[in-house]
Amino acid sequence: MNSSMNVLRLLVALLFAVTSVFGDNATNNVISAHAKYVDGDMNGALADCNRAIILNTNYAVAYATRGDVMRCKGDLNEAVADFNKAIELKPNYAYAYSARGYVKELKGNLNGALDDCNKAIMLSTNRAIGYAIRGEIKGRQGHLDSALADCNQAIMLDANLAVGYVIRGEIKAMQRDPN
């Protein structure tokens, strides 16, 4: 078992210990949902998100987390609905815009996806994922130079963002750039 999984399991154990001391609350359920999401337990993550929302119906992070889970489960309409709710509750929530943009891209709504990525970047210029997703969308639209610039910006902001490199490689391949 790799060390990141050991750390994840330790965090989940710590969460349960904290929950037993401080009680069940929405934040603890979202933390648990994230851990289960990373571990690939989408049903467990979904149950924790639902519990968090029951405990706090105004918790935008719970809806965004559930949106991520629904995307992974392939229910893109429910994912968009959850990201919409997160944005309704927290209008300046850059992550929810970039995540919703990604789902819109998956659904083929490139203009809507681009609008969401632009909004996410406007709200938080250091959101590397917003640039990476926007780069992918621009590449699909044939705007290769602009797409490459967005991917480079994503990588500059987060050198560990693997998807930024993947998308940049795809864009360069479309440009027939061997570098």
Image (tube, rainbow, N blue to C red):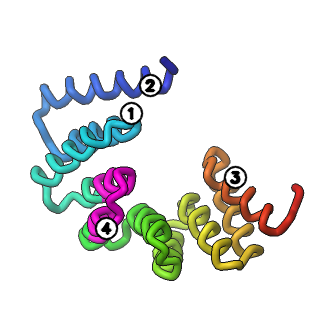
**Amino acid identity at mark 2:** Met
For residue 77, which numbered disc appears in the image? 4
Neighbour tally class for label 4: few under 14, some 14-19, many 20 plus, Cα within 10 Å = some
Of labels 2 and 4, the one closer to you: 4
- Up-down relation of residue 77 to residue 35 (above or below): below
Residue at the top extreme of this rendering: 1
The overriding secondary structure of the stretch rendered in magenta is helix
- Up-down relation of residue 46 to residue 80 (above or below): above
Quadrant including the C terminus:
bottom right
Quickly name the residue at label 2: 5
Q: Secondary structure at mark 1?
A: helix
How far apart, in angstroms, are the residues tagged by discs 1 and 2? 8 Å
Lateral position of residue 7 relative to residue 172, left or right = left
Q: Residue at x 59, y 72 (%)?
A: 137
28 inside magenta stretch: no
Q: Secondary structure at mark 4?
A: helix
Quickly name the residue at label 3: 165
